[in-house]
Image (cartoon, grey):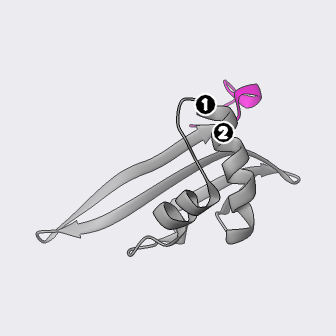
């Protein structure tokens, strides 16, 4: 397993991961691109994926925004493939 910054090429695999890991939510490539990669304060170092070969096992996407002189951090998405849960990927 290796941890990498999310890239544009990862978005189709991230879509598949989200559909499997978060079946009650609705995702599309355009939504992922708009809400994550095209965010105004985009910080690639806060958008990480866990890969094993070509397979995406997990992802955590965070952001930091400035509001009224303060920096506010948030986790925008966290997902781990169901078949790889309980193996420390999300931690």
> Camera-side residue: 2 or 31?
31
Q: Mark 1 points at which residue?
A: 23
Badge 2: residue crowd in 10 Å (few <14, some 14–19, many ≥20): some
Q: Is residue 91 above or below residue 39?
A: above
Badge 1: residue crowd in 10 Å (few <14, some 14–19, many ≥20): few
Does residue 53 appear to the left or right of 82 in the view shown? right
Q: Name the residue under label 2.
A: 19
> Camera-side residue: 60 or 38?
38
Marker count (numbered): 2
Q: Residue furthest left?
A: 68
Q: Residue at 49% x, 47% y: name it.
A: 77
Q: Residue at 42% x, 49% y: name it.
A: 75
Residue range in magenta is 81-91
Does residue 48 appear to the left or right of 40 in the view shown? right
Can you tell which quarter of the image residue 71 is in?
bottom left
Where residue 28 appears, as percent x and y from the top left, is: 61, 53
Where residue 90 appears, as percent x and y from the top left, is: 59, 37
Can you tell which quarter of the image residue 10 is in?
bottom right
Q: Is the magenta stretch mostly helix, strand or loop?
A: loop
Badge 2 vs badge 1, beta-carbon distance below 8 Å: yes
Q: Is residue 69 magenta?
A: no
Q: Distance between the residues labelled 2 and 1?
A: 5 Å
Where residue 67 appears, as percent x and y from the top left, is: 17, 67
What element does badge 2 sit on? Answer: helix
What element does badge 1 sit on? Answer: loop
Q: Is residue 72 above or below residue 43?
A: above
Q: Residue at 64% x, 33% y: name it.
A: 21
Can you tell which quarter of the image residue 22 is in?
top right
């Amino acid at each position: 397993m290796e941890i990498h910054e999310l890239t544009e090429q990862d978005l189709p695999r991230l879509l598949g991961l989200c559909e499997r890991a978060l079946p009650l939510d609705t995702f599309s490539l355009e939504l992922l691109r708009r809400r994550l990669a095209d965010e105004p304060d985009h910080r690639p170092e806060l958008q990480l994926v866990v890969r094993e070969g070509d397979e995406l096992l997990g992802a955590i996407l965070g952001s930091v925004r400035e509001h009224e002189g303060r920096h506010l951090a948030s986790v925008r998405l966290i997902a781990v493939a169901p078949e790889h849960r309980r193996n420390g990927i999300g931690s």
